[in-house]
Image: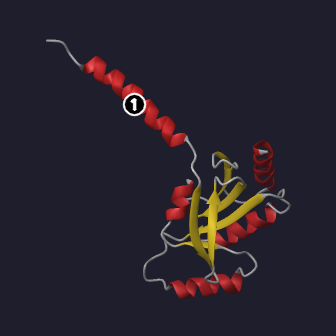
């Protein structure tokens, strides 16, 4: 009796590699979130334009996103910028209306997309505990990310990643 283990391992290696390769192929992603004013916004990744997504799951998300917004001023044209507050960790008993009212009053100039369930942040590959700036090429592939608080060096890295996307 012969063992089928080598053949099974070879088949798994071949098909497993094919599945992993297929998973790396970018597909256009279109998702929708509302901002703090209740207006829906479509997030479009992989539809022919470079994308910068500032994603923050932290308690001070609005402040961190606003700081990144200032640091990233002057991005080249043809780049879509999305500012996403991942609010999944917000306790269920905190009224959403109070949160949106507070965001309108304190951060009215920065349009924040509110991800109440954390689904969009997860789909984009956003981190769970730290603010990050994710950079995607026109084809939807992630070109890189900068994690942490806004900084000049971080903003320069984002701009460098965008320059490589062209």
In the image, residue 69 lies at what x, y percent? 76, 66
Q: Position of residue 97 (x, y in %)?
A: 54, 87
Residue lying furthest top: 1
Q: Residue at x 50, y 35 (%)?
A: 21
5 lies above or below 41? above
Q: Choose between 104 and 21: the one closer to the eye.
A: 21
Q: Which residue corresponds to the image point at 80% horizontal and 66% vertical from the top-left?
A: 70
Numbered circles on residues, count: 1
Residue 113, image x and y in percent? 62, 72
Q: Is residue 26 visible?
A: yes
Q: Position of residue 143 (x, y in %)?
A: 68, 45
Q: Is residue 100 above or below residue 117?
A: below
Colour scheme of the rendered structure: secondary structure
Res. 29 image quadrant: bottom right
Q: State whether residue 112 is above or below residue 75.
A: below
Is 88 positioned to the left or the right of 164 in the image? left
Furthest toward the left, the residue is 1
Please identify the quadrant where the N terminus is shown.
top left
**Helix, strand or loop for disc 1:** helix
| Left or right placement of residue 144 versus residue 13 in this view | right
Q: Residue at x 72, y 54 (%)?
A: 49
Query: Dot 1, crowdedness within 10 Å: few (<14), some or many (≥20)?
Result: few
Quadrant occupied by the C terminus: top right
Q: Is residue 128 something that shows in the picture? A: no
State the residue position of label 1.
15
């Amino acid at each position: 009796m012969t063992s089928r283990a080598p053949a099974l391992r070879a088949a798994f290696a071949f098909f497993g590699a094919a599945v992993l390769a297929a998973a790396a192929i970018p597909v256009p992603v279109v998702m929708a979130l509302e901002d703090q004013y209740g207006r829906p916004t479509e997030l479009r990744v992989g539809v022919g334009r470079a994308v910068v997504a500032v994603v923050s799951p932290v308690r001070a998300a609005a402040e961190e996103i606003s700081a990144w917004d200032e640091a990233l001023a002057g991005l080249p044209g043809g780049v879509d910028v999305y500012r996403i507050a991942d609010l999944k960790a917000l306790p269920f008993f905190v009224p959403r209306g109070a949160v949106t009212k507070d965001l309108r009053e304190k951060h009215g100039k920065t349009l924040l997309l509110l991800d109440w369930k954390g689904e969009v942040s997860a789909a984009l590959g956003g981190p769970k505990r730290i603010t990050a700036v994710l950079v995607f090429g026109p084809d939807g592939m992630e070109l890189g990310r900068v994690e942490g608080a806004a900084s000049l060096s971080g903003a320069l890295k984002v701009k460098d990643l965008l320059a490589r996307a062209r």
